Each structure stands twice: as C-alpha cells, then as structure tokens.
Image (tube, rainbow, N blue to C red):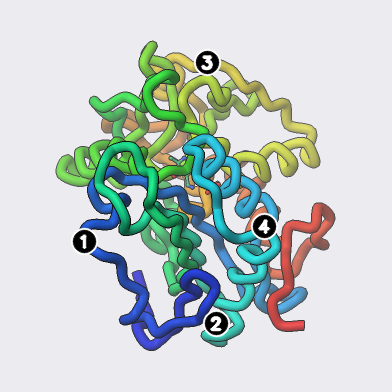
Amino acid sequence: MGFNESSKIWYDGEMVDWKDATVHVNAHVIHYGSSVFEGIRCYNTGSVGTAIFRLDKHIKRLFNSAKIYRIDIPFTYDEIYQGCIDVIKMNKFKEAYIRPVVFRGYGNLGVLPKGCPINVAISAWDWGKYLGDEAITEGVDVCVSSWSRLPANTMPSMAKAGGNYMNGQLIRMEADVNGYSEGIALNQEGYVSEGSGANVFIVYGGILYTPPLAASILPGITRDCVFDLAEEFGIEVQKQMLPRSLLYVADEVFFSGTAVEITPVRSIDKIQIGEGKRGPMTQKLQERFFGLFKGEYEDRYNWLTQVYT
Ligand code: PMP
C-alpha cells in the first residue's frame, strides 16, 4: 500500500496536509466502529486519461450505508462527489485508490451517539494489485472461513460500515495465518456469502452463479459490472443461495471487488478448482473489464468520470 504522506486529504470540506487529518482518541468511531466508507478506484485510462470508476454508484452507496445507521452526512452528494475528484486533482494523481469515510467524531462516548459530530474525510493513495500482481493472471489460493458473515438481523451487511470489518478481519487474518490469500465466508445457514473484501462468483455448467443480497453480502459495485458484462457475452447469471460444495466442484471461481478487481481463484481448501488456473469465462470477463481502462472498449455505460478535463 503506497501512502503518500505529502499528499492532501479532503477533511470536512477543506484540503489539509496528510499529517493534520487526525481524530481524537475519544471520537465515537474509535470505540464503537461507527463509520461508513467507500473504496473507489481511479484509473489512468487509455481513452480519457485519469478517470474515476463508477463514482456515482459509490457515492450513492455511501449515502445508503449512512442512512441505515441514521448518520446524517453534513455534505451533499455533489460535495462528496466533487471532493473525490478534487483529491485526485489536488494531488496530481494519475491512478489512485480513493477512500471516503464518514464517521461519528468527538463529543460523547455513550453508545447512543447523540451530540457527536459527523466528520467526513476523503484520502487517496496508490494501492496496486490488492492480492499481488500475479493474482490477476494466475489466480489465488483461498479457504472457506470458519467465521460466518453477519446474520441478517445482527449487523446490516448492505451497509459498508467500519464495524462490519471486524468480521472481515477475522476472516482475512485466519486465511492469512493458514497461508491463504483470502477466506470465503458462509452465511448463517451455511450458504456461500462472500470474501472479507470481495464478492464471489462460481462458473458451473456454463452458468455464472453468485449469492443474492439475502446471503449477507455487500451489494458490490464490481459485482454489478460483472452482470452487465456477462449480459454482453450472453452468459446466463443466476443469483441464488449456493451450497459450499458447489465451490469445490465449480469449473471456475472468481472474486469481484474494487480492490481485487476480477481475480480468479485456483484452489479452495487445497482442492483444485477447474484446471487450477484462470478459467476461460473469468478471462473473458477480465479482458472486457480491464479493456475499458486500456481504452480498448468504449465507455458504453458511463462508468468513467474523467478527472482532468
Ligand atoms: N464485499 C465486501 C465485504 C467488500 O468489502 C467489498 C469491497 N468494497 C466487496 C464485497 C466488493 O464491493 P465493490 O465491488 O463495490 O468494491
């Protein structure tokens, strides 16, 4: 992860130096995980230069996450949207990962967050390939986690909220100590849910399967892109509850997410998936996905927001 500590951060509407974008140790968020956030990528495209990918969808999801938690963001959609663009421009980034975070700040440490201000920060940094450069072409080795995703009436998985990532950390750390790149968590009933930071797709008998929202997943924006690209290729997509066993017998498995982009899975719990390498459907979807950034395809869905006009 390439933090650039000489860069500026958009903090409550002002551009501040990296070192000055701080919070108090008694901010509500530190004790109770009371934040919602987004992870957005900005690519140096072959068509329109530096462009933010699916900015509109991300800002809408940020507001939805806040709504679920009764967080009233003290900035408008337009202000946050523009803040993301300004952070890239101000720092003259060509490519970056953008992280807007909305959190309950310093004011009161009761669980009831009355009197706490809502603060907003937008940072950006260079975050290369999340699971390593080879992951995209070679695939990754993963496990099924012993931790489940959040049962529906405990914490809302539809909100991209800081506290949810305590569960994500358990999944990811367990995978890591056992030598795996990522863990796939099941939901409360034992059906496939998602990774700690990515959605899961399974190719089986020519059909593309992925768990529905009811399987305690985050409504991934890259997942949504995969639906559109699959449709272009005439690939049938089924959103349904998936048994763990389907993972092992799948022809292909891949992750989708802003950080992981489209990453093939070559083994699960040391069981080889398909041919043990990136499968043809994954490759086809990747080519179309990455091709947009290379300028090989037109931006037919308006997924790109040009930064330097
Ligand atoms: N699930 C979880 C738990 C995540 O953290 C992410 C990353 N934001 C995803 C799925 C993928 O979502 P997106 O494609 O919007 O990045």
- Residue at mark 2 to residue at mark 4: CA–CA distance: 22 Å
The residue located at (38%, 88%) in the rendering is 6
- Residue at mark 3 to residue at mark 1: CA–CA distance: 42 Å
User: Is tag 4's residue or tag 1's residue first in the polypeptide sequence?
Assistant: 1
Nearer the camera: disc 3 or disc 2: 2
- Residue at mark 3 to residue at mark 2: CA–CA distance: 41 Å
Give the x, y percent position of residue 145. Answer: 28, 29
| Identity of the residue furthest to the top in this view | 189
Q: Is residue 61 left or right of residue 124?
A: right
Give the x, y percent position of residue 103. Answer: 41, 54
Secondary structure under tag 1 reads: loop
Please give the residue where the numbered disc 4 appears in the rendered image: 77
Q: Does residue 136 appear in the picture of this structure?
A: no
User: Is tag 3's residue or tag 1's residue first in the polypeptide sequence?
Assistant: 1
Please give the residue where the numbered disc 1 appears in the rendered image: 25
Callout 1: 10 Å neighbours few (<14), some, many (20+)? few
Residue 3 numbered tag: none
Q: Quadrant of the C terminus?
A: bottom right
Nearer the camera: disc 3 or disc 1: 1
The residue located at (34%, 83%) in the rendering is 5
